[in-house]
Image (spheres, rainbow, N blue to C red):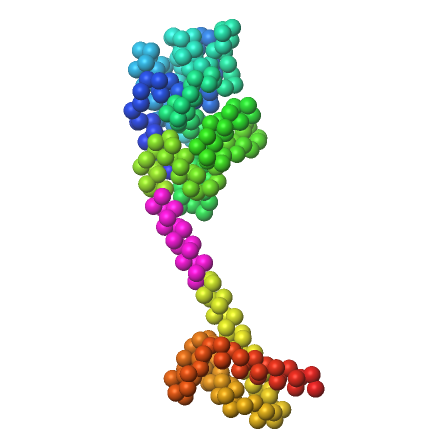
Amino acid sequence: MTFSGKIKEEISKIDSEKIELLSELSGIFCTNADIKLYSIRVQTENLNAANRIFKIVKDIYNVTSNITVKKNYNFKKNEIYIIEIKSHVPEIIKDLGLIGETGFVINTVPFEEIVADDNLRSAFIRGCFLLTGSVNDPKTSRYHLELIVNTNEFAEFLKTQINTYGLNSKVLRRKKGYMVYIKESEKISDFLKMIKAFNGVMYYEDIRTYREKINMNNRINNCEQANVEKSLASSNKQIKDIEFIKAKDAYDLLDEKVKTVAEYRVKYPDSSLIELSEIISVETGNKVTKSCVNHRLRKIKDLADKLKEK
């Protein structure tokens, strides 16, 4: 089962109060349902979603929905579950905020009462995700969560509800419909927490933390490697300057302290400046700091540059 499938399986088993179940069902129907005054028809490839719809309608309205199963031969061979409700339809769509005072079905967004507080809003978004949401497994190379809806108006409404929790979701036009999506890993984790997919959150956070630790170690290793390469490049240039000065018979123009640093630089080409200062201090018995070593190597460079100019 995919990570999205596991999330949907978990949230389809949440126990909620009746008022929250109505908001969840409203989210389901707003996202993907053919609603008429005499019937409601929902199609999904997710069995848990189909069972959730059946159970909510049965528990609240004592209505047994018809479920039809057919094969999907459009690229995928998944089964498609078609849920049809043909009883108490006007009552249901009125309770879900999907019918106006004139008696016409609202095909855009529900009444504000459906998302009146955090619990109802969370349930509504959970219903939307159950039908058309998906989220990448955190083990993959990129973080991505999305919900596909039919109209721009509903996409903007859903984005507003999601962003009430500071999740920074955005809307993108697709060939078929509109995508409400989140890219930031922390925000995706917060989204899963908001829809009460707590097992999914624990798995997501474990993998995300592990990936970030690996990435941090890689960045540190890359930084250290870059510093080593930079240090070696500087060392090679310093040694070439020393050899150049000797080739020009100008080595004796350097004072004894500078000559000492030059000898140790040639002897220990792989050592950093701080390592070189420690080696010189130990082997000569004279305390030499990194700053001193750097200053004396600069004198060698200055002399080499003057010789090159002549």
Q: In the current view of this chain or complex, which residue is farthest to the right?
A: 310
> Is residue 216 on the magenta stretch?
yes
Q: Is residue 142 above or below residue 53?
A: below
- Splitting the image into 4 quarters, where does residue 242 fall? bottom right
Location of the N terminus by quadrant is top left
Q: Position of residue 90 (x, y in %)?
A: 43, 8
Would residue 271 be visible to someone looking at this image? no
Q: How many marks?
A: 0
Q: Which residues are magenta?
A: 205-221
> Is residue 186 on the magenta stretch?
no
Q: Is residue 38 left or right of residue 59?
A: right
Give the main secondary structure of the magenta stretch.
helix
Residue located 59% across and 81% down the image = 301
Q: In the current view of this chain or complex, which residue is farthest to the top?
A: 102
Q: Is residue 220 left or right of residue 296?
A: left
Residue located 56% across and 25% down the image = 152
Residue located 42% across and 55% down the image = 216
Q: Position of residue 36 (x, y in %)?
A: 47, 11
* Front-lying residue, 213 or 143: 213
Q: Position of residue 250 (x, y in %)?
A: 61, 92
Q: Position of residue 131 (x, y in %)?
A: 42, 26
Location of the C terminus by quadrant is bottom right
* Front-lying residue, 267 or 115: 115
